[in-house]
Amino acid sequence: MGNCIHSPIKYLSPSSTTPTSPVTPGSSTVKAGSSFTSKLSSINSSTYERFIDNEGYPEGRILESPNLKIFTFAELRSATKNFKADTVLGEGGFGTVYKGWLDEKTLNPTKCGVGMVVAVKKMKPESMQGLQEWQSEVNFLGRLSHPNLVKLLGYCWEETELLLVYEFMPKGSLENHLFRRGAAFEPLPWSLRLKIAIGAARGLAFLHSSEKHVIYRDFKASNILLDSDYNPKLSDFGLAKHGPTDGDSHVTTRVMGTYGYAAPEYVATGHLYVKSDVYGFGVVLLELLSGLRAHDPSRPSGQHNLIDWAKPLLIDRKKLSRIMDQRLEGKYPIKAALPAARLTLKCLAVDPKSRPSMKEVLETLEQIESMMGRSREGKVGKSSGLKNQAHHTSLIEE
């Protein structure tokens, strides 16, 4: 979840909804006049359609209102084996995420190991941050449908219990694959890194191209989840905010996010631009290239801040190898790495006006992918795929 960087926390209320009477999930009610009632927006509680079909909407779509299943607390307690410790997938500022099992057709809880695996996020009772981010998740992610956004399946609201139910992403987060060591986290080959960057760019470009620009505000490696085929999906919309309207260039809000990823203009002034997300994308792209965290005090002096250290090296072909992830062992095409490095530098421009749009970022990454494909066909035959490319050093040479 997002962390406060410098300024006091300001929680958002999406402009698409206004506070009204609370919904009544299951057989439970929320006490009128409670802090929950006054803070939460109303949510459409129409019957959940199991498959919001992206095949008919390959570029994504926006629903007029959230179309989610309302779960009872008892159902989710059953689905997660009473929130047992051995079902924990992770923890954040909101609370704990558990693995659960539901029937694929009815979404009713099933026995452990039977049916569809889901991720159930349970808010900490004392977390006011979680309360507001829960609302934002439902109002934003409940209405957005895109192949590169994680699917929110439903929610639970009973008394002080707030939970969210998502599709399960079996490969976990990009952060784990980039920075963790061990047999479960082998180094990502260049081809997969590019695939992940392109998919994440598509998701972000979709948010920016919607009728009401959605500023994601917390783009980072831990919020990029991977399915069984390493297709990336953006998760955690707790800090998402509608972008500027009526010709304004930015919206002003108190600073929220994660240190190292937030754009400098946002940190300094609270002015949030659509292109503030582009800066965050540039940080993650640099992490994909280098295999290093955006901020790491354990690194040598002068290298704690990855951006400050790497920027002078990104445009120098001879120095690029100093940035590239050593775990790649040189197995990347220099003709693809160099334009990716230059794109990273553009995304990290101090002036938001100098940064490319996410549409331009996506087009550039797709051109790099296309260039790699043409080179493979010419050098190793049309039968070679991206998987084979990872085992050759500099297939695309100068």
Image (tube, helix red, strand yellow):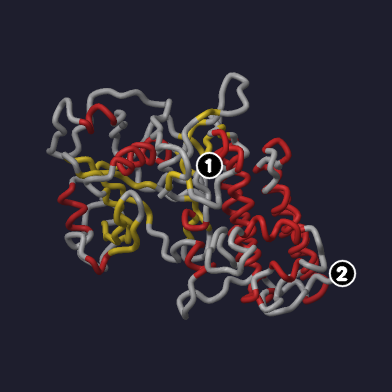
* Side of 396 relative to 351 (left or right): right
Amino acid carrying label 2: it is Glu
Residue farthest toward the right in the current orientation of the protein: 398
Residue 346, relative to residue 319: is it above or below? above
Q: Position of residue 261 (x, y in %)?
A: 55, 50
Q: Position of residue 223 (x, y in %)?
A: 47, 54
* Side of 330 relative to 123 (left or right): right
* Side of 280 relative to 359 (left or right): left
Which residue is label 2 attached to?
A: 398
Q: Position of residue 77 (x, y in %)?
A: 18, 55
Which residue is label 1 attached to?
A: 60
Quarter assignment of residue 66: top left
Amino acid carrying label 1: it is Gly
Q: Residues within 10 Å of mark 2 (few under 14, many from 20)?
A: few
Picture mark count: 2
Q: Residues within 10 Å of mark 1 (few under 14, many from 20)?
A: many
Q: Nearer the viewer, residue 10 or 45?
A: 10
Q: Residue at horizontal 35%, vertical 43%?
A: 49
Callout 2: SS: loop
| The C terminus, quarter of image | bottom right
Quarter assignment of residue 191: bottom right
Question: Which numbered marker is on residue 224?
Answer: none
